[in-house]
Amino acid sequence: MPVGRGLLYLIVAGLGLAMFQTAYFAAVSATGLAVATVVTLGAGPVLIALGARLTMGERLGRAGLMAVAGALTGFGVLVLGGGDTTVRPWGVALALLSAAGYSAMTLLTRYWGRDGGADASRTTVWAFAVTTLCLLPFALVEGLVPHTAEPARLLWLVAYIAAVPTALAYALYFAGAAVVRSATVSVIMLLEPVSAAVLAVALLGERLTTATLTGTLLMLGAVAGLAVTEARGARAVREERPLG
């Protein structure tokens, strides 16, 4: 990849990450966690599928469409099945903006990854560097250091969050997004609320509701169906290639 194009890719990926994270938390504040999460992660697969079809010619196919529909249904049951929600237009608009940032980041990573131009570690470092520059002015206004009575515990938690669910998780995300179809990435990312539900039950003692169980099973089934479809597609491609 030419240096100029590579730098542009890294900058745009960082801007997409900044938009995704910032607009999402703003949406949570504006309209609540459930609605913000449903709109952001629900609109993501749709935007990514459309973008991949228009820019890269990727097709979902019947199995892919069923997987997306099943995942979105399970996601809606999982998040909205447990209580009352309040929908505010401004919060929905912010959630859609977050979905757009996430979709742009995913599509761009997949586009460059097709030519072997996306390096996971380099993309992660530069994306977070750009995101940091974008958010630094807001952090300076709000305060860089949170106020707490337990600074040692806070530092340990910040270090863990920075290293494991942020740096490691996004490095794996960029590596996967570079080699897997964009629509598949978007559906697999919907496993995030499933993981949260499992951890809440296992570690925090929360009750396993019917909605949680139903939504989790629907989403896991959708991801399993996509995995089978991807495996069959890869096998068919190998069989079509001439020997030697």
Image (cartoon, rainbow, N blue to C red):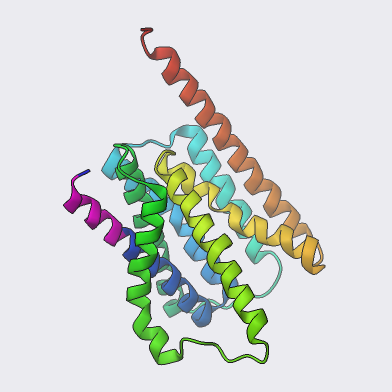
Q: Which residues are magenta?
A: 2-12
Q: Quadrant of residue 140?
A: bottom left
Percent across and percent down for residue 233 are 47, 25
**Residue at 46% of width from left, 18% of height from top?**
236
Residue extending farthest to the front is 152
Q: Is residue 227 magenta?
A: no
For the question of whether residue 213 can be seen, the reply is yes
Is the magenta region chiefly helix, strand or loop?
helix
Query: How many badges with numbers are in the image?
Result: 0
Q: Depth check: 171 or 56 in front?
A: 171
**Residue at 36% of width from left, 7% of height from top?**
244
**Residue at 66% of width from left, 75% of height from top?**
84
Examine the rendered structure and indicate whether residue 15 appears above or below residue 49: below
Percent across and percent down for residue 174 are 43, 50
Examine the rendered structure and indicate whether residue 204 appears above or below residue 107: below
Q: Depth check: 48 or 165 in front?
A: 165
Percent across and percent down for residue 223 are 59, 42
For the question of whether residue 100 can be seen, the reply is no
The quadrant of the rendering that contains the N terminus is top left
Task: Say left or right for 129 vs 225.
Answer: left
Examine the rendered structure and indicate whether residue 56 appears above or below residue 153: above
Percent across and percent down for residue 142 are 44, 90
